[in-house]
Image: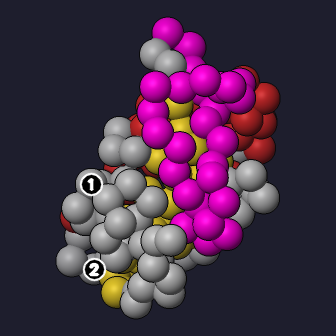
């Protein structure tokens, strides 16, 4: 998969049923449609985040293309005091999170204790030599 931000190949980080596509260059994250829900492991918290999302008609950020379907993604803003803007595939294939946005979404959607558990889990994925990391060849080039 190619990074929608910097156009470099991404790597896959796997643990149990969660597979995160990660860009080592810009540190962005692609989550397939159900992976954010799996990270939350709490349907109520997940629904709180999704329900709070507001589609932005105008944004200062340039629209990015979905790495799956290649259509321009939709900008969605969520959060309490700290607003987070992420990109969502218009066909529901997944979401793109710039560096730090996943942390912000988790802090918004989960109680502090649960959010810290997930952050430890993600820290393990990104830093542990035991994590399963596999390279994925670029499937398509940017038009």
- Label 2 to label 1, Cα distance in Å? 23 Å
On screen, 137 above or below 43? below
Give coordinates of residue 9: x percent, y percent. 34, 76
Judging from the image, what secondary structure is the residue with disc 1 in?
A: loop
On screen, residue 11 versus residue 82, left or right, reads left
Q: Dot 2 corresponds to which residue?
A: 130
Q: Dot 1 corresponds to which residue?
A: 26
Tag in front: 2 or 1: 1
On screen, residue 86 versus residue 71, left or right, reads left
Q: Nearer the viewer, residue 115 or 4?
A: 4
Q: Is 78 a magenta residue? A: yes
Magenta part, dominant SS: loop
Q: Which residues are magenta?
A: 53-81
Give coordinates of residue 31: x percent, y percent. 56, 60
Give coordinates of residue 53: x percent, y percent. 70, 28
Give coordinates of residue 111: x percent, y percent. 55, 27
Q: Residue at x 59, y 61 (%)?
A: 66
Tell me, yes or no, if residue 47 can be seen here: yes
Number of residues whose C-alpha sits closer than 10 Å to that of mark 1, classed few (under 14), some (14–19) or many (20 or more):
some
Name the image colouring. Answer: secondary structure
Lower position in the chain sequence, tag 2 or tag 1:
1
């Amino acid at each position: 998969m190619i990074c929608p931000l910097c156009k470099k190949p991404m790597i896959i980080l796997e643990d149990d049923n969660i597979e995160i596509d990660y860009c080592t260059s810009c540190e962005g994250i692609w989550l397939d449609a159900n992976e954010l829900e799996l990270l939350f492991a709490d349907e109520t918290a997940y629904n709180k985040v999704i329900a709070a999302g507001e589609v932005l008609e105008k944004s200062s950020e340039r629209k990015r293309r979905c790495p799956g379907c290649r259509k321009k993604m939709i900008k969605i803003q969520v959060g309490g005091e700290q607003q987070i803007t992420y990109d969502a595939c218009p066909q529901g294939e997944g979401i793109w999170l710039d560096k730090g946005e996943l942390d912000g979404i988790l802090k918004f959607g989960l109680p502090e204790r649960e959010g810290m558990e997930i952050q430890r889990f993600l820290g393990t994925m990104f830093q542990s030599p035991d994590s399963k990391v596999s390279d994925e060849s670029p499937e398509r080039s940017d038009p």
